[in-house]
Image (cartoon, rainbow, N blue to C red):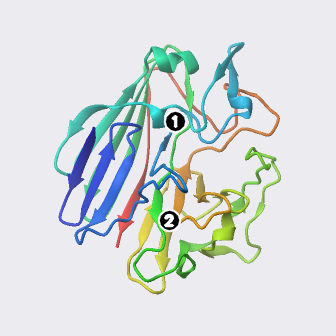
Amino acid sequence: MEYTIQNEFLTVVISDLGAELMSIKDVSGHEYLWQGDEKYWSGRAPIMFPICGRLFNGEYTYLGKTYTLPNHGFARKSVFSLKSVSRDFVTLELCANEETKACYPFEFIFDVTFSLNNNTLNVKYEVKNKDTKDLIFSVGGHPAFNVPLDKGLNFEDCYVEFNKSCEAVRVDFSPACFLTHNDKVYNENGTKRIDLTHDLFDNDAIFLYNVAKEIKLGSDKTARSVTLNFNGMKYIGLWHAVKTDAPYVCIEPWTSVPATQDKVDNLVTKEEMIHLPCGYSYKNNYSITIK
């Protein structure tokens, strides 16, 4: 089922499958969200939970037992239930069940709220620990946006730009997209603007940290833009289908990154996971502003 929220600036559609954004249109009807052409990538804006990225061999261990999780976790393929809805917001909920506990042995509630404030869409994650032990997880977003931003432009006419220069560090991945721990400064002269070219993604995603927490997808040839604010997320990723001319770019705020090459993680010691005590809640969010 799909839910539509709107105000005088934006109309947004969200699916209960994965609590995934399906459309972001402005008042003129212009679509900003990638529409999932299978020729390149069928996703639009999947949610990462309870892991971001992939596990080595698709496995992790917890209390001496081995479990299997798909890339980015199971939330993106799970059907969420409706918790609340109005004209300009909707909250969808995923609760632990027998299927999730077979691959992730925890009791949890995961709420995703989409709300509109003028020309900004806020995406809020809330994770509640309903277990008797620490809940261990990470969370992130994977929204994709149409590039170019306007008719008559080319992919190369667009760029992504931080709101201030930063000494961004790029996460180094192996050819199989696992951590190598050989991270390097992305640009010795400071990173602010990255001009988009298709070959940027020939070696898969660009993941950065130590960055400014606002990034804009824009062009010098149109007034249209998409700006993400991700104050609570350490990483921002840029990606499109490898070695293609895909007409979109994903801008991905994550709290953590994939597993290390050749290492099956113990969930308790896996790097940068959130450890949420029994009875507590965790909240994080990012926003998408359309101009």
Q: Is residue 87 visible?
A: yes
Q: Is residue 10 left or right of residue 249?
A: left
Q: Amino acid at mark 2?
A: Glu
Relative height, residue 217 to residue 70 (above, below): below
Image point (82%, 35%), residue name: 262
* Residue in the image at 63% along x and 74% along y: 197
At label 1, counting other C-alpha atoms closer than 10 Å, the crowd grade (few under 14, some 14-19, many 20 or more) is many
Q: State whether residue 51 is above or below residue 253.
A: above
Q: Nearer the viewer, mark 2 or mark 1?
A: 1
Depth check, front residue: 161 or 278: 161
Cα–Cα span, label 2 and label 1: 22 Å
Whole-percent x, y for residue 250 in the image: 53, 58
Residue at the front extreme, as displayed: 39
Q: Which residue is mark 2?
A: 214
Side of 34 relative to 246 (left or right): left
Which label belongs to residue 262? none
Q: Residue at x 51, y 31 (%)?
A: 74
Q: Horizontal and vertical percent for residue 254?
A: 56, 48
